[in-house]
Image (tube, rainbow, N blue to C red):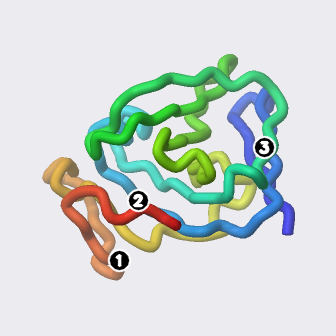
Protein backbone atom coordinates (compact mmCIF):
# COMPACT_ATOMS: atom_id res chain seq x y z
CA UNK A 1 0.00 0.00 0.00
CA UNK A 2 1.18 3.52 -0.72
CA UNK A 3 1.24 6.14 2.01
CA UNK A 4 1.93 9.84 1.60
CA UNK A 5 3.50 12.45 3.84
CA UNK A 6 4.87 15.95 3.53
CA UNK A 7 5.51 19.28 5.13
CA UNK A 8 3.18 22.12 6.13
CA UNK A 9 3.84 24.28 3.04
CA UNK A 10 3.83 21.42 0.51
CA UNK A 11 7.41 21.97 -0.69
CA UNK A 12 8.40 18.43 0.40
CA UNK A 13 6.37 15.39 -0.59
CA UNK A 14 7.05 11.88 0.65
CA UNK A 15 5.88 8.62 -0.93
CA UNK A 16 6.06 5.43 1.13
CA UNK A 17 5.68 2.00 -0.53
CA UNK A 18 5.62 -0.02 2.70
CA UNK A 19 3.68 -0.56 5.88
CA UNK A 20 5.06 0.88 9.11
CA UNK A 21 7.45 -1.34 11.07
CA UNK A 22 6.92 0.37 14.44
CA UNK A 23 5.91 3.64 16.08
CA UNK A 24 7.19 5.17 19.32
CA UNK A 25 6.56 8.30 21.33
CA UNK A 26 9.87 9.82 22.39
CA UNK A 27 10.46 12.25 25.27
CA UNK A 28 14.24 12.65 24.85
CA UNK A 29 15.40 16.27 25.07
CA UNK A 30 16.17 16.43 21.34
CA UNK A 31 12.64 15.32 20.50
CA UNK A 32 11.26 17.89 22.93
CA UNK A 33 13.08 20.56 20.90
CA UNK A 34 11.68 19.11 17.65
CA UNK A 35 8.18 18.88 19.14
CA UNK A 36 8.16 22.42 20.51
CA UNK A 37 8.15 21.14 24.10
CA UNK A 38 6.17 17.94 23.75
CA UNK A 39 7.22 14.44 22.74
CA UNK A 40 7.45 13.36 19.12
CA UNK A 41 5.74 10.34 17.59
CA UNK A 42 8.02 8.63 15.11
CA UNK A 43 6.95 5.98 12.60
CA UNK A 44 9.58 3.58 11.25
CA UNK A 45 9.69 2.45 7.62
CA UNK A 46 12.27 0.64 5.47
CA UNK A 47 14.37 3.47 4.00
CA UNK A 48 14.49 1.84 0.56
CA UNK A 49 10.70 2.22 0.28
CA UNK A 50 10.61 5.98 0.94
CA UNK A 51 10.95 8.55 -1.85
CA UNK A 52 11.16 12.29 -1.33
CA UNK A 53 10.38 15.16 -3.68
CA UNK A 54 11.53 18.66 -2.79
CA UNK A 55 14.46 19.97 -0.80
CA UNK A 56 15.16 18.51 2.63
CA UNK A 57 17.76 20.12 4.90
CA UNK A 58 19.65 17.72 7.18
CA UNK A 59 21.01 18.41 10.65
CA UNK A 60 23.47 15.98 12.25
CA UNK A 61 23.66 15.49 15.99
CA UNK A 62 24.25 12.88 18.67
CA UNK A 63 21.09 11.61 20.38
CA UNK A 64 20.78 11.01 24.12
CA UNK A 65 21.29 7.32 23.31
CA UNK A 66 24.73 8.11 21.87
CA UNK A 67 23.58 7.35 18.32
CA UNK A 68 24.72 9.72 15.57
CA UNK A 69 21.54 10.99 13.93
CA UNK A 70 20.54 12.87 10.80
CA UNK A 71 17.27 14.78 11.12
CA UNK A 72 15.57 16.15 8.03
CA UNK A 73 13.22 19.11 7.78
CA UNK A 74 11.65 21.30 5.11
CA UNK A 75 13.91 24.15 4.09
CA UNK A 76 10.91 26.44 3.45
CA UNK A 77 8.58 25.95 6.45
CA UNK A 78 10.82 24.08 8.90
CA UNK A 79 8.51 21.11 9.40
CA UNK A 80 10.44 18.25 11.09
CA UNK A 81 10.10 15.22 8.81
CA UNK A 82 12.75 12.52 9.30
CA UNK A 83 15.28 10.89 11.59
CA UNK A 84 17.93 8.42 10.44
CA UNK A 85 20.38 6.73 12.80
CA UNK A 86 23.86 6.38 11.29
CA UNK A 87 24.02 2.85 12.73
CA UNK A 88 20.75 1.81 11.01
CA UNK A 89 20.65 3.53 7.59
CA UNK A 90 18.20 0.88 6.31
CA UNK A 91 15.48 2.45 8.51
CA UNK A 92 13.90 5.90 8.35
CA UNK A 93 11.64 7.47 10.94
CA UNK A 94 8.95 9.83 9.72
CA UNK A 95 7.18 12.16 12.16
CA UNK A 96 3.59 10.97 12.54
CA UNK A 97 2.35 14.54 12.09
CA UNK A 98 3.88 14.65 8.61
CA UNK A 99 1.86 11.63 7.45
CA UNK A 100 -1.23 12.43 5.39
CA UNK A 101 -2.95 9.88 7.65
CA UNK A 102 -1.48 10.53 11.11
CA UNK A 103 -3.75 7.76 12.43
CA UNK A 104 -1.96 5.16 10.28
CA UNK A 105 -0.29 3.75 13.41
CA UNK A 106 -0.19 5.05 16.95
CA UNK A 107 2.73 4.79 19.32
CA UNK A 108 3.40 1.29 20.62
CA UNK A 109 5.72 2.43 23.41
CA UNK A 110 6.84 5.60 25.18
CA UNK A 111 10.61 6.00 25.40
CA UNK A 112 12.91 8.37 27.29
CA UNK A 113 10.31 8.91 30.03
CA UNK A 114 13.21 9.85 32.35
CA UNK A 115 13.56 13.09 30.36
CA UNK A 116 9.84 13.93 30.27
CA UNK A 117 8.81 17.04 32.23
CA UNK A 118 6.65 16.53 35.33
CA UNK A 119 3.57 17.81 33.47
CA UNK A 120 3.87 15.26 30.64
CA UNK A 121 0.94 12.88 30.22
CA UNK A 122 2.22 9.34 29.73
CA UNK A 123 -0.45 7.05 28.29
CA UNK A 124 -1.04 4.34 30.93
CA UNK A 125 -2.03 1.88 28.18
CA UNK A 126 1.45 1.90 26.61
CA UNK A 127 4.69 0.44 27.95
CA UNK A 128 7.03 3.10 29.35
CA UNK A 129 10.82 3.01 29.18
CA UNK A 130 13.19 5.43 30.93
CA UNK A 131 15.62 5.45 27.98
CA UNK A 132 16.14 3.93 24.54
CA UNK A 133 14.84 0.44 23.83
CA UNK A 134 16.29 -2.08 21.37
CA UNK A 135 16.02 -0.84 17.78
CA UNK A 136 13.64 -2.15 15.17
CA UNK A 137 15.30 -4.94 13.20
Q: Is residue 102 left or right of residue 52?
A: left
Q: Check whether the beta carbons of the residues at disc 1 and disc 2 lie within 8 A of each other.
A: yes
Q: Residue at x 76, y 49 (%)?
A: 50
Q: Which SS class for mark 2? A: strand
Classify mark 1: residues with Cα within 10 Å, few (<14), some (14-19) or many (20+): few
Q: Is residue 10 above or below residue 131?
A: above
For mark 1, give the secondary structure. Answer: loop
Per the image, the residue denoted by label 2 is 25
- Answer left or right for 94 relative to 10: left
Q: Residue at x 36, y 41 (%)?
A: 67
Query: Who's the residue at 28% across and 66% down the image?
Result: 122
Q: Earlier in the sequence, mark 1 or mark 2?
A: 2
Contact (Cβ within 8 Å) of mark 1 with mark 3: no
Q: CA distance from mark 1 to mark 2?
A: 10 Å
Front position in the image: 70 or 26: 70
Residue 78: give x, y in percent of width and height: 59, 24
- Counting from the top left corner in percent of width and height, residue 48 is at 75, 51
Badge 2 crowding class, 10 Å Cα cut-off, few under 14, some 14 to 19, many 20 or more, is: many
Q: Earlier in the sequence, mark 1 or mark 3?
A: 3
> Rounded to the nearest whole Å, what is the CA distance between mark 2 and mark 3?
21 Å
Q: Position of residue 61 (x, y in %)?
A: 39, 27
**Structural crowding at the residue carrying mark 3, measured as other residues with C-alpha within 10 Å and reported as few (<14), some (14–19) or many (≥20):** some
| Image mark for residue 27 | none
Tell me where residue 23 appears, x and y as whole percent.
Answer: 51, 65
Q: Which of the 4 quarters of the picture holds residue 81?
A: top right
Q: Which residue is mark 1?
A: 126
Please give the residue where the numbered disc 3 appears in the rendered image.
14
Amino acid sequence: MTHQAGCLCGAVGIGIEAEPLAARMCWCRLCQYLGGGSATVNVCFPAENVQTQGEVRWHESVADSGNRMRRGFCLECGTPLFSIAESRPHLIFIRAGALDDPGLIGPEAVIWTSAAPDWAHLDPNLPHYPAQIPPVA
